[in-house]
Image (cartoon, rainbow, N blue to C red):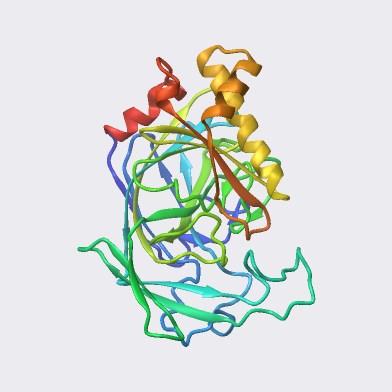
Amino acid sequence: MSDPIHIPADPGQYGYTFGGREAIAAVKPGAPITLRTLDCFGGKVRTVDDLPSQVCEFPYLNPVTGPLHVEGAEPGDTLAVHVVSLTPASSFGISSTFPHFGALTSTGYTRTLQEPLEERVWLYDIDLDAQTVRYRARRSDFTVDLPLAPMLGTVGVAPAANEVRQTIVPDVHGGNLDTPLLGPGATLYLGVNVPGALLALGDGHARQGDGEVCGVAVEVAMDVTVVVDVIKGVPTGTPRLETDDQLVSLGAARPLEDAFRISQDDLVRHVASLTGLDLLDAYQLVSQTTSARAGNVVDPQYVMSAAIDKRYLPGTVAYGGVHERLRNG
């Protein structure tokens, strides 16, 4: 195994786009990478009185640490990013509502005569020993402890054709995928578009429900350990995930049904490739076994996942078994 590399979340080590930035470090496949990511507010929201509109500089939200130049990664390859561990780096997390942002309010994309929602901040206590996140209502004394379920909301590489995308946008390069499936033990597969891939990641969540309905998860700075590998000569057209139990395809688009179709189409084609089934046989198998979950329904593009349990694909191994190799070190 290559020597580990550590990257702090210092100024100059993070940014707000995929593409358009030079690498801050070079990493080797197989080397553990430990880094600190900032929360989506850049650490500027620390109390319930810190309204994001007053303390944050828009549009500079959702910082990602990186980019990292992955040695040997070239266009046409696939980058595998295995999440080894995620540990909240703060004793509290933050969520909020924004005017004109979220699934249940008028937005710039979906305009109505509805009055904008109140901007309100919630502070969640994080107990690492108990592995809980404490919800506290703002207008009553109601509290409840929720399971800590850390995940990375945003992981991506530089887009193709010199394109630059804001970190809040999910697409084929990854980006703000916001799927709770991207937690410890998961491997994310991204197509490489530029030499070195230029990987960046951030937007740690202490937990998030499917869809990220109000627009903001339990946001928290995160101590992250990942390990990467390069799968040479194998392209990946839309982000995919693998866990010990499932193969997952992700689709990003608007409207939501197109994100659904992208994820389902990719999973059918992936299953056909792995099993040797013809396309309609794979379509039938996926139709009877898949689960579909919303990643986000609030960002410039929505995200849907399509997942199939590996037990329905006996004798198959995705990407040459890279998930198992990275998981086992």
Q: Give the camera-side residue of 295 and 32.
A: 295
Can residue 162 be seen in the rendering of this structure? no
Q: Give the camera-side residue of 170 and 166.
A: 170
Q: Give the camera-side residue of 179 and 201.
A: 179
Image location of residue 40, percent across then percent down: 50, 66
Image location of residue 42, percent across then percent down: 47, 71
Q: Check the image and report above or below for 208 versus 33.
A: below
In the rendered structure, the answer to whether residue 221 lies left or right of residue 99 reads left
Q: Residue furthest left?
A: 129
Image location of residue 153, percent across then percent down: 49, 55
Q: Check the image and report above or below for 294 versus 221.
A: above
Image location of residue 290, percent across then percent down: 53, 33
Residue that appears at 48% across and 43% down: 69
- Number of callouts: 0
Q: Check the image and report above or below for 310 versus 294.
A: above
Q: Give the camera-side residue of 288 and 225.
A: 288
Please identify the quadrant where the C terminus is shown.
top left
Residue that appears at 32% across and 70% down: 90
Please identify the quadrant where the N terminus is shown.
top left
Image quadrant assignment for residue 135: bottom left
Q: Check the image and report above or below for 38 versus 321.
A: below
